[in-house]
Every structure is written in C-alpha cells, then in structure tokens.
Amino acid sequence: MDVEYLFFPQWQGSGEHPDLYDGAELLFDELKNDFDFSKIEVSREVRDEKPPIKYLKELENQLSYAANLIQKTNPETIFTLGGDCSIELAPISFLNKKYDGDLSILWLDAHADLNTPESSPSGDFHGMPLRTLLGDGHNDLVSKLFSEISPSQIYLTGIRSTDRSERDYISDQGIKKCFISNIIHSFREVTDHLSTIENEHIYIHFDLDFLDPSDVSSVPCPEAGGLSFDIALSLIEELKLRYKVVGGSICEFNGKNKDESRKVVGLARELFEF
C-alpha cells in the first residue's frame, strides 16, 4: 500500500500555543528514523491575533502546501504527525475523495471541534476543523478541500467538553457519539457502530486530550475523565486488526513533560505501522 507520512507541526489553529510546534518536533526526532516523513513547512511567527479565525492566512497557506504535496504523491494511506487538530483538513478530505465517501472518521478527542467562525468563543481554529470538513466553515478554507464529508461518516469518541452550539449541531445532524465510560471495559460499542456503517475504510484522528491527564498532561486543553494510555493503545490495536485503517493522526502534544513523549511515540508507532 502506498503510504504518505506527513510531519505537519502546524500550531496556528491553537491560536496561542506555539509550543505545539516544539512538541511535534520532539516526537518527530524520535520517529524520523522509523518513518519517511514529508515535512509541511510551517511559519513560526507569533502575533497578537484576533477572532473570528486567528492566523487565517497561515492556515490557508499551509493547507495549500499540504494539499499540493498530497496531490502529487497520490497516496492510498496518510498518517500525520501534528501539530494541532487543524492539520486534518487536507488528509481527510483527500482520502474521502479517493475512496468516494467510503470512509468512517473515528474522532478520538475530548472536544467535538464542530464550531464555526461565528460560534467559536475563541477564534482558535482547532475547535473548527471537523465542521470545516463538513463544508460549513470559512470559504477560504472550505474551497481548498478535496471533498466534503457527511455527518453520518463521523463517530465522536471520548468527547466530554462541548459548546452549546456544538451540542445543538450534533443533535440536529444526528452525529453519533460514544462516551469514555462505554469503552473502558469493552470496545464493542465502537466496533458495532463501525460495522453498522459498513464503510470499508477507517480514519483515526487521535487528539491526545482523548487520554486522561494523569497519563498525558502535555496538551493545550486537558479534560479530566479521559481514557488511560494502555486502553487507548489496545483500542488502536483492535481497530487495526478488524478494519482497513487508511489514515490517522497524532495531534496536540506540547512537549512540556518530556517523559510523556515516550508514551506518545509508542502510540504513534502503533498507529502508523503496518
């Protein structure tokens, strides 16, 4: 299988966390001998940015860079080391187009990332990428997508912090979700749902705030009540055994606790390896 590994240390989606670049680079240094990464060039300039979308120009430029690279290599599979959650626009929209919508997106994240520029309380784009992938976002970003996904393709897993507008959208669109309490002892709810959708291809988005802060705390927006590292690792192993995983990402590591990088590197190796 033709695989593209991307190193995309984009931090601008987080608005005020340039340390996500440093965290991604820390992981990259540990993984660069294992995987042949293509690097997406990312600006490191920090400015005082304002809503509705902070660092919009950088997000546009870096999305174009990533999209052009992916289009040239035309891979069957894409794994991305980020960066914040905004790195998902090019990989997911490309794979969705490649597989003609036959793609389930498992969003392992404490947050739904379903805000719009109008509903976002912060203007930080890492709270908007999933909504943008649905075609409901800033036109300068939506227009650069390879394709748009549908709500039925999304499975929100582990969410425990949402804004009112996101909760309303999830309810209105019938987006399915799974809480941490339902996967601590068994993955059956996840696997049953993915089997019901009957999509052959799976994409695994892994925001590290999906994990409990007692295991990995080096994230911009930690939320109590996450999954333990060991169970999360087993979940990825199970998904890879049962389904055709054609992409995934590791996002939102700021590297402040370097001891935690060993865990995250192990997680990345499990997700990225064939």
Image (tube, rainbow, N blue to C red):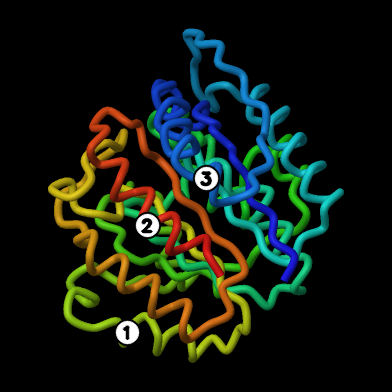
Distance Cα–Cα, label 1 vs label 2? 22 Å
Query: Where's residue 87, x and y in %?
Result: 57, 42
Q: Which residue is mark 1?
A: 189
Q: Residues within 10 Å of mark 2 (few under 14, many from 20)?
A: many
Query: Where's residue 50, x and y in %?
Result: 49, 16
Q: Which residue is mark 3?
A: 81
Query: Where's residue 122, x and y in %?
Result: 40, 28
The N terminus, quarter of image: bottom right
213 vs 104, nearest the viewer: 213
Reply above or below: 212 against 2. Answer: above
In the rendered image, the residue lying farthest to the right is: 72
Of badges 1 and 2, nearer the viewer stands 2
The C terminus, quarter of image: bottom right
Amino acid type of the residue that numbered disc 2 sits on in the rendered structure: Leu
Judged from the image, the secondary structure of the residue bearing numbered disc 2 is: helix
Displayed quadrant of residue 146 = bottom right
Reply above or below: 202 against 67. Answer: below
State left or right for residue 158 relative to residue 26.
left
Amino acid type of the residue that numbered disc 3 sits on in the rendered structure: Leu
Judged from the image, the secondary structure of the residue bearing numbered disc 3 is: strand
